[in-house]
Amino acid sequence: MRTKSENAIAFNESFKKRSNRQHMLSFAVCTHCGVCNDSCHYFLATDDPKMTPVAKMDKLRQVYKSQKGPLGKLAPRWVGAKEMETDEDLKELQDIVFGSCTGCRRCTFNCPFGVDTASLVGLARSCLVDLGYAPEGIKAVMKNQWETGNQMGISKEEYLDTLQWIQEELQEEFSDPDFIVPIDKKGADFVYVINPREVKYDPRPLQAAFKIFHHAGLDWTMGSEGWDNTNFGLFSGKADLGGHMGNLAYNQAKKLEVKRMVISECGHGFRSTKWEAPNWGKANPLPFEMVSLLELMVDLINTGKIVLDPSKNPYPVTYHDPCNLSRSCGITEEPRFCLKRACVDFRELMPNRGDSFCCTGGGGAMSMVEYAPRRLEVARVKADQIRKAGAAVVATSCHNCVDGLRDVIKNYNLRYDYRDAKAPKLLRVCNVCELVAEAMIIPVEIQKTAIKASKDAVRGKKILVIDDEPDIIVFIETLLTDNGFKVITANDGITGLQKAKAEQPDLITLDITMPGKSGIQLFRELRSTAETANIPVFIVTGTIDFRQLMYQKAIPAPDGFMMKPIDPKVLLTTVNKILEKAARNSTVVN
Amino acid sequence: MDYIVWQNISPLTKLVMNQLHYLGLLFMISVYAYRIHQIFQFPAAKEGTPPKGDQRQAIRYSYLTLAMPWEIESQKRHMYRYIEFVIFHIAMAVSILFTWTLPMAHEFMKNPVIIGFSEFFFVLGFLTGTSRLARRLYSPAMREISSFDDYFSLILLTLWMLFGILAAPLKSEPFLFGFYCFATFLHFYVPFSKIMHYLYWPFIRYYMGKHFGHRGTYPKKGSMPSLK
């Protein structure tokens, strides 16, 4: 008899201890009927027999059959029973449960029995993670959440700084000094919990939500702690981490004595915070209600607290149902209610709601860069769905979906012929609250001013643009110059370093993929050279591998990051944010 | 050809039709009882949050979806397979009914209408079993997921149907003997095979309905919005 490896033995033991009744039934009931095959985008896109839900889960099911199945010990080959035996078995299982399943549960809803593949994947992940068999991105984010309380390791200072910056932006936009972002306001009606991505990389959904709250006259607050609604307990299968993250948010809400917690548009974040973490963290019963921002917006529209003008969103909009919201939380009508009132032309993806296909970014996939090629290959199914809808904008209520869909749209070159563009542009992807905020009719007494290119503190600042693509340089240079900045450029890493030392810019925008000295090498050099160490760096790249480097902290954290193709609004917002923060910090120091 | 004279049936055939058959049933029930006990040895995942939806309605819905092919995409898209599934399982139910009714009411079973009814479902069972086997052998995706038990169970049931076709007219003792050998063997084999899935089905559908009903996902929302 072959000797099992120590890891395999540990896995088998762990598996036996953690299997619950629902797992057992999912293992035992499967008849290999194959009905689930074409509900899985991995199989549909590849036609690979090893990518069907049954084939994938059989790797785990054979462990159950070996341990508990009727013929598992007597005739294992007859029924396909086999425990994990080698480290290679574990690596193969890791590839399956992390790299070949997003836990979207589409197969479960199409299974005549209801085999819950996602929960089996969660079981396997939890056993593997304990043995170190997990993608580096997952491990890195788990570490961040344990150590800092949020998935991106954002410091309290940076978080509060961002909120203050947003407050100032909105005060200026609406010429309203009373536009306050409350922090730790005790006794408020609700506390708003968010995805760290909104703080670190794209504050527009956060700005949109704040606009809605302010103009609706709501009594709300942000928490200085426990503000992260994301939860890698779900993606790692680790209930202890899941409970920890949930309890951080719940404790803050209890401390603030709020009546409700409103959860921003994050699919797994909403599901984890509202449904899973109270069980994981043994937090029930909670003294406050938890609702989605979508549900709040429906209420605000219904009660007339916000009034929408759909003509402000003239392009056709479709809605991608996040798997966690639609299949695991039953939230499908709320976003449609909002979008039909915020846009003139809303059209459905087919299929939709509980039958919608995964964006391919779920289950933690966006932090697992090693599986990106496969993810993009199987995204063909989603791309076809979006293409057929013929929309210009894809709205969704999940940040992983936003990133996942942007990758899909870019990879499959899905474009729309916008009236005000010279050539068809890639489809826009955004949260529902952004479209609602854009459609909001602001009361007439608030005079809306044009967004200033930069505040006085940052007007005329010098920005060094480093990119090897001439078109990108021209685009960024034109955009920044038109908005009052002074721009110098470099088209390779060596020249970039020379100019950074010589010109001492206030900010550097940096491409990653360049010939010769790469952006990563240059970034490390800038940080390790005394003359340039304190110059803020804003990474602008088309390479998705960069996310992994950031999650793993293999490089110093940049001051900003965005993916190409460049969204001018995001670029300008981030440039302003970084420069204003730097200006504020230098005022404090002086 | 005349009907079998019941008094002239060989002792071996009678043994298989009666004592062994009942022994097989007793064995199957015992193993099923153990299997149900085994289910409850596993702790159930508990839900402590306040429910959003109606769990009872969701559990009812969960059980009924099998009879509502329009509710499940895989059933809608593959209506042939759904009809095949329904026919196959009805044929199995009719076969089981046949095996237990015949020893107790053999004169009644000689009625041409009863014979015709039984033959009809044995033929359908045989055809659907063969169709399923063909698909399992032909499709690469199905071959990938098929174990020896998957093939053997299907071959067993399909051959049982074939013997049923031959035995149902009640004019040949050898075919009747063969039919009951299969039936008896199934009682001893089913508790160790995937055919036992019907024992687990009520439990897993219950938990599925409870879980998704709690979250407000079940029953599935239709295509029309439920909000104003």
Image (cartoon, coloured by chain):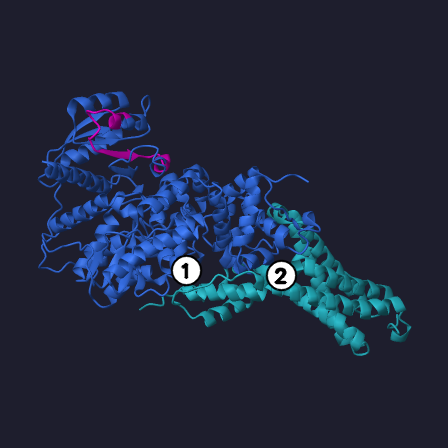
Chain colours: A blue, B cyan
Q: Say which quarter of the image contains residue A278.
A: bottom left
Using a 10 Å C-alpha cutoff, classify the residue at mark 2 as few (fewer than 14 neighbours), some (14 to 19) or many (20 or more).
Answer: some
Q: Residue at x 68, y 64 (%)?
A: B31
The residue wearing badge 2 is B197
The tag on residue A245 is none
- SS under mark 2: helix
The residue wearing badge 1 is A279
Instruction: Please check the rendered image and state whether residue A542 is part of the magenta-colored stretch, yes or no.
Output: yes
Q: Residue at x 83, y 70 (%)?
A: B170
Using a 10 Å C-alpha cutoff, classify the residue at mark 1 as few (fewer than 14 neighbours), some (14 to 19) or many (20 or more).
Answer: many
Marked residue chain, label 1? A
Please identify the quadrant where the C terminus of chain A is shown: top left
Return the x and y of residue A418 as percentages of the image width and height.
27, 45
Return the x and y of residue B91 as percentages of the image width and height.
68, 66
* Residue segment shown in magenta: A525-548
Mark pair 1, 2: CA separation: 30 Å
- Using the image as rendered, state which of residue A227 and residue A170 is in the foreground: A227
Q: Is residue A176 visible?
A: yes
Q: Residue at x 21, y 33 (%)?
A: A536
- SS under mark 1: helix
